[in-house]
Image: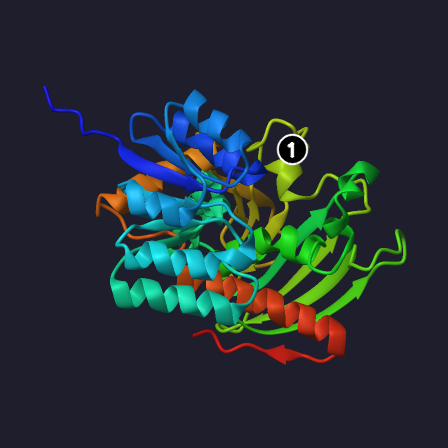
């Protein structure tokens, strides 16, 4: 009988809402991983750690001085990520960083360099890449099943309730759907369709009148020649958003729709339903019937647990990061270009590095 390997020991830095979700995911990822420590200045984090059978430290520095985890999960505010990640990577600790990886692409680049120069893995929490339908769609696209990719469209339409904005930062620049929500969608279309090299965007906030965008219309050009459109709004009651279609979070009622559509010269694909549409008969005329000749298998949609299991594999040296720090930086570059275009009204070119 094969000997079971001990779980990797993960320390979580930051015990806010995101950190607590990751702590729960680590518990669900047993026996691949276990929570070894929590670091947070809030005294409530001490009870949280003790209840989970883990150690508590008031700061990252205190943890690094006294504990020996196998990996670090940073769930702290984005502006703290670069300094904290440089410390954990210098200590030789693989680090999973909550998205976005930093507040700017320049800061994200410093994390990527620290990872590459130290030879220690840095991962970014764009957890939707772990969705089974996304992985299956990437395989289909790379196999040539869609032909040459021509067009992409992503929806984020839903209506956020008024009490969502009780946290004042959500009504201020940086708290709108472009950075908070579209970071996931942009990352998925990059993962599936290649690098974005130009963006043009418009934003609006005329419904609520807050100092942050509530709607955006975005055009993208990909390095391979494909064009993309993304529309986002958090004031529209609608069934077309990843949240309401992916069945990854039970608090959202599933609508049975899709949120991302990718079209090529041989077929088109929708996600997260995971269906590939092609003409049912040989030929290329529009009078031929279309049929969904492939459907992605419905499997485990606990994406945070899947991300922790992947992190454990990276810590053991058995897998390369699915979303490296440099990948997180490139997604952030696109988001910055979108915001700059909305401010200036100009097409903004992007040089992925």
Classify 136 as above or below 298.
below
Q: Residue at x 29, y 31 (%)?
A: 32
Nearest the viewer among 26 and 258 is: 26
Residue under circle 1?
Answer: 256
Q: Is residue 337 left or right of residue 195?
A: right
Instruction: Mark 1: give few (<14), some (14-19) or many (20+) Cα within 10 Å.
Output: few
- Residue 195 shows in this picture: no
Return the x and y of residue 342 as percentages of the image width and height: 74, 71
Return the x and y of residue 116 as percentages of the image width and height: 30, 66
- Colour scheme of this structure image? rainbow
Nearest the viewer among 143 and 185 is: 185
Q: How many marks?
A: 1
Return the x and y of residue 267 as percentages of the image width and height: 53, 54
Classify 208 as above or below 7.
below
Return the x and y of residue 52 as percentages of the image width and height: 41, 23
Query: Where's the N terminus, which quadrant?
Result: top left
Q: Is residue 29 left or right of residue 205?
A: left
Q: Is residue 186 left or right of residue 25?
A: right
Instruction: Residue 255: name its quadrant.
Output: top right
- Residue 325 shows in this picture: yes
Q: Residue at x 63, y 39 (%)?
A: 243
Classify 203 as above or below 32.
below
Classify 306 as above or below 78.
above
Q: Residue furthest left?
A: 1
Nearest the viewer among 290 and 329 is: 329
Query: Where's the C terminus, which quadrant?
Result: bottom left
Secondary structure under tag 1 reads loop
Nearest the viewer among 225 and 288 is: 225
């Amino acid at each position: 009988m094969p000997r079971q390997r001990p779980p990797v020991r993960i320390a979580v830095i930051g015990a806010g809402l995101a950190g607590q979700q990751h702590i729960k995911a680590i518990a669900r990822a047993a026996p691949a991983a276990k929570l070894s420590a929590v670091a947070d200045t809030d005294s409530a984090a001490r009870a949280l750690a003790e209840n989970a059978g883990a150690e508590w430290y008031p700061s990252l520095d205190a943890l690094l001085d006294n504990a020996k985890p196998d990996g670090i999960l940073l769930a702290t505010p984005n502006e703290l990520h670069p300094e904290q990640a440089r410390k954990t990577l210098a200590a030789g600790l693989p680090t999973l960083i909550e998205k976005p990886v930093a507040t700017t692409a320049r800061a994200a680049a410093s994390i990527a360099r620290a990872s590459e120069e130290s030879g220690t893995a840095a991962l970014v929490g764009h957890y939707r890449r772990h969705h089974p339908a996304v992985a299956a769609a990437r395989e289909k696209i790379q196999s040539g099943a869609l032909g040459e990719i021509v067009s992409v469209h992503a929806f984020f339409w839903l209506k956020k309730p008024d009490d969502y904005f009780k946290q004042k930062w959500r009504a201020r620049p940086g708290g709108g759907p472009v950075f908070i929500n579209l970071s996931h969608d942009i990352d998925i279309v990059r993962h599936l369709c290649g690098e974005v090299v130009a963006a043009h965007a418009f934003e609006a906030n005329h419904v609520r009148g807050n100092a942050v965008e509530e709607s955006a219309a975005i055009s993208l050009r990909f390095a391979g020649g494909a064009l993309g459109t993304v529309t986002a709004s958090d004031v529209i009651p609608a069934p077309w958003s990843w949240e309401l279609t992916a069945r990854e979070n039970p608090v959202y009622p599933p609508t049975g729709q899709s949120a991302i559509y990718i079209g090529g010269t041989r077929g088109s694909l929708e996600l997260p339903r995971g269906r590939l549409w092609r003409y049912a008969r040989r030929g290329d005329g529009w009078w031929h019937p279309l049929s969904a000749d492939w459907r992605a298998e419905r499997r485990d949609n606990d994406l945070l647990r899947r991300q922790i299991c992947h992190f454990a594999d990276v810590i053991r040296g058995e897998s390369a990061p699915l979303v490296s720090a440099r990948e997180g930086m490139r997604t952030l570059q696109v988001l910055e270009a979108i915001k700059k275009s909305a401010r200036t009204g100009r097409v903004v070119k992007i040089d992925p590095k």
